[in-house]
Image (cartoon, helix red, strand yellow):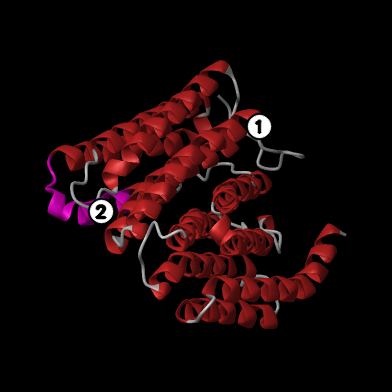
Amino acid sequence: MIRRNPHEPHRVSTPLELFFDLVFVVAVGVAGRTLLHNEAAGHFSVGLLGFAMAFFAIWWAWMNFTWFATSYGTDDWYYRILTLVQMAGALVFAAGVTGIANPEHPNFTLGISGYIIMRVAIILQWIRAGIGDPSGRKTAFGYAIGIAIVQVYWVLFAVVVPDGIKPWMFLVGALAEIAVPVVAERFNTTPWHRHHITERYGLFTIIVLGESVLASTTAVIEAVNESEQLGDLLLIAGTGFVIVACLWWIYFALPQHELLTSFRTALGWGYGHYFVFAAAAAVSAGIEVALEVETQHATLEAAAAAATLCVPVAVFVFFVWLLVVRPQATTPSNVAMPAAVVLILLSVFAPFSLQITALILVALVAFLTAYAVPHRTKHLN
C-alpha cells in the first residue's frame, strides 16, 4: 500500500466509496427515524442527545474512512475486504441506534459493538499503510495506536460506566476520537486530495438530503391515502421538497476545494461538517413530524412541531455559511445568510412556519445565485 498523489488529475470517487456511502446512509436513516419517534412523542432532549451521539459515531467512522481513502485508497482485494467489514459494522451499529436513543432504558452494547467493528477495520488499514509507506509510517502507526486506545475506552464505556453519566463520558470519548488526527498528523501530513475530499463530502451531503426527499414522498403517499387531508399533506410534501432543494442549492453555491489550503483549514472544514450532515439528517425527521402532527398521529404544540424542522434548517444554513460561504463570498452574502438563519428561527413562532421557512430559503438561493455565479464563472474560466 503506497500513498496516493495529492495532485492526481481527474481523481473521483470510486464505486467502492459510493457503495460505502450507501451503506452508511442506512445508519443515518435509522438515526433519523429514531429522532422522529422521540420528537413525535415529545421526548426532545433525550431524542436530540441520542441522535447527536449516534450520528457522531456514524459521521466519525465515515469521515475516517474518507480521509484514509483519499490518501491510501488502493482498491485491491485486501482494501476492499476491510472496507466491507466497516460496512458490516455500520449495519450492526444501525441496529443499535434505537437502544442508544431509548428515552427510558438506553442500551449502548449493540451500538458500541458495531462501532468497534468499524474501528478495528480502519486500524488494520492504517497498519497496512504504515508498513507500505515508510515516509508516512509514524503518522499511520500514530492513527492505528490512537484509534486502538480509544476503542479500549469505548469497551469500558459500555461495560463499566453507569447510565446516569454516560452522556458526559460519551463526550470524553468523542473528544478523544477527534484528537487522534490532530496528534497523528504532527508526524507527517497525509497526502489528501482536496478535489477528491470535497467531492466525497458533497456526495454524502446529497445522499443524506435524500432522506428528506423520502420524507416528502411519504407525505405524498399519505395524502393519497387520506383524501380528507389531501391539500394539507400535499402542501407539506411540496414545502419539504422546496426546502431540501434549497439546502442542496445553498451547499453547492460556491466551490469548496480552494478552501482546503492546509491541514489546519481542512481539519476545521471537515470537523464542522458534523453539524451540516447532522442537520441535513434531522430535516427529514422534521418533515415527518409535520406529517405526524397533520394526520393526528402526534400531538405537539405548533411551535414545537415547527422547531423540529426549522431549527435543523437554520443549523444547516449557518454552518454552510461558516464553513463554505463566509471565507470566499461578498459582504452582502455574508450578511444575508446569518440574517436568513435568524428569520428561520423566528418563523418557528409564526403561523405557516414551514412555508415561511421555504420562502426565506428561496429568497436566499436567489440572492446567493446573483452573487455566487460571478465567482463560479471566474473559477471555471
Q: Can the viewer see residue 145 in this picture?
A: no
Is residue 147 shown left or right of residue 316? left
111 to 320, vertically: above or below: above
In the image, is residue 41 above or below residue 322? above
Task: Work out which residue is located at the far front of the displayed protein and give it.
Answer: 228
The single residue placed furthest to the right in the displayed view is 381
Residue 155, can we see it? yes
Q: What SS does tag 2 mark? A: helix
Write down the residue under mark 2: 172
Q: Quadrant of the C terminus?
A: bottom right
Label 1: few (<14), some or many (≥20) within 10 Å? few
The numbered dot on residue 14 is 1
What amino acid type is highlighted by mark number 1?
A: Thr
Query: Residue 187: which disc?
Result: none
Q: Over which residues does the magenta segment extend? A: 160-176
Side of 257 relative to 21 (left or right)? right
Quarter of the rendering containing residue 367? bottom right
In the rendered image, residue 274, in percent from the top left (x then y), is placed at 46, 55
- Residue 229 pos. (x, y %): 55, 61
* Secondary-structure class at tag 1: loop
Which quadrant of the figure contains the N terminus? top right
Q: Residue at x 59, y 38 (%)?
A: 70
Q: Look at 60% across and 26% down and name the residue there.
A: 74
Residue type of the residue flagged with mark 2: Val
Question: Where residue 204 appears, x then y in whole percent?
Answer: 58, 46
